[in-house]
Amino acid sequence: MTEYIWKRNEIDSPCVNICIVHPQANICAGCFRTIDEISGWSNMSAAQRKEIIKELPKRSSKLQVRRGGRAKRLGN
């Protein structure tokens, strides 16, 4: 007798639950997707999603890293 295991057909997503859109780069600081990519993700084909996921590491360099913040301004 074969045991039936119910599985959900989840959509692969690079989301890391850090959803902040960088104002200049217009990409999410958590997953590096654009707003259009995020909003259309569930309607994309698996091939389209894989292609975007492949490009995401290159986008991380578009975000400027803050250097210093409040401590830097106060001279600490």
Image (cartoon, rainbow, N blue to C red):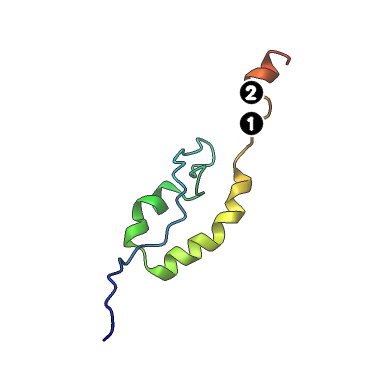
Q: Of the residues shown, which amino acid type is indicated by label 2? A: Gly
Residue 55: x %, y % from top left: 55, 59
Q: Nearer the viewer, residue 52 or 3?
A: 3
What number is the disc on residue 45? none
Q: Please name the residue shown 61% across and 55% down the image.
A: 58
Is disc 1 surrounded by few (<14), some (14 to 19) or many (20+) residues within 10 Å? few
Q: Please name the residue shown 60% across and 48% down the image.
A: 60
Q: Residue furthest right?
A: 75
CB contact under 8 Å: marks 2 and 1: yes
Q: Nearer the viewer, residue 33 or 8?
A: 8
- Secondary structure of residue under mark 2: helix
Q: Please name the residue shown 53% across and 37% down the image.
A: 24
Q: Please name the residue shown 63% across and 47% down the image.
A: 61
How far apart marks 2 and 1 lie (CA) works out to: 7 Å
Tell how many labels.
Answer: 2
Q: Residue furthest top?
A: 74
Q: On the image, numbered disc 2 is attached to which residue?
A: 69
Is disc 2 surrounded by few (<14), some (14 to 19) or many (20+) residues within 10 Å? few
Tell me: 48 left or right of 76. Answer: left
Tell me: 17 left or right of 74. Answer: left
Position above or below: 68 against 22? above
Q: On the image, numbered disc 1 is attached to which residue?
A: 66
Classify the position of the C terminus by image quarter.
top right
Residue 23: x %, y % from top left: 50, 35
Position above or below: 4 against 68? below
Residue 59: x %, y % from top left: 58, 51
- Secondary structure of residue under mark 1: loop
Position above or below: 4 against 28? below
Q: Of the residues shown, which amino acid type is indicated by label 1? A: Arg
Q: Residue furthest bottom?
A: 1
Position above or below: 69 against 3? above
